[in-house]
Image (cartoon, rainbow, N blue to C red):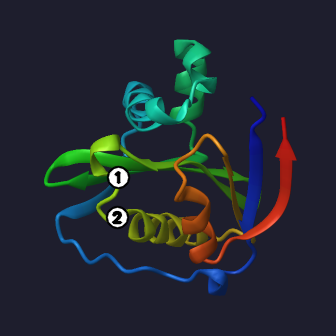
Amino acid sequence: MPVTITYLEQTSPDDLRPKELADPRLTVVEALAPQWRFNHFLYCLVGHDWQWFDRLKWSDDEWAAFAESPDLRTLVGYYDGSPAGYIELRRQGDEVEIASFGLAPRFVGLGLGGAFLTLAVRAAWAWEARRVWLHTCTLDHPRALPNYLARGFRVVRTVTE
């Protein structure tokens, strides 16, 4: 089955079209003491339904190198104290990639995605990037691409595999 990958970017903090958080039950906390097993857990929790399988073949050492790198920030959304989603920001020179972004299945459809993405983009720009970018694909949630576009990301390339 063909999959279309869409690459998107922002090149200025002014590109962000924010959606402010209206639900006080969602809090976002940065994991300042990196633990690769936690990132692995979040990856599986959020990505299982969307066929995020690429990292499942990683060794423990590969997970540790990725998740415990000083160039990675992990922000976790908690809804009423339960992990509701997460964001991984990966610095690459003067660019920041939103390497992972998503909500756990139980929290999809509650109207949290736009505000959660807004927090991710603000955190990425706070890292003094000249460009913030990400990619999504046709296997992701159907509202993923519209959310990225609504937050001010522009499509820069699409590839079908």
Query: Which residue occupies 59% across, 66% down?
Result: 146
Q: Where is residue 12 in the image (x, y as percent from the top left)?
A: 71, 80
The residue lying at 66 percent from left, 45 percent from top is 138
The answer to which of 120 and 154 lies nearer the viewer is 154
Residue placed farthest to the front in the image? 1
Number of residues whose C-alpha sits closer than 10 Å to that of mark 1, classed few (under 14), some (14–19) or many (20 or more) = some
Picture disc at residue 108: 1
Query: Which quadrant holds residue 94?
Result: bottom right
Residue sticking out furthest to the bottom: 14
Give, as a three-letter code, the residue at label 1. Answer: Val
Residue underneath mark 2: 112
Left or right: 31 with respect to 128?
left
Identify the residue at image location x=54%, y=67%: 147
The quarter of the picture where the N terminus appears is top right
Question: Residue 17's quadrant in the figure?
Answer: bottom right
**Which image quarter holds the C terminus?**
top right
Choose between 151 and 110: the one closer to the eye: 110
Give the structural element (helix, strand or loop) at label 1.
loop
- Of the two numbered discs 1 and 2 in the rendering, the one whose residue sits closer to the viewer: 1
Q: From this viewpoint, is residue 97 visible?
A: yes
Q: Is mark 2 on a helix, strand or loop?
A: loop
Residue 27 picture quarter: bottom left
Residue 63 coordinates in the image, percent (x, y): 54, 23
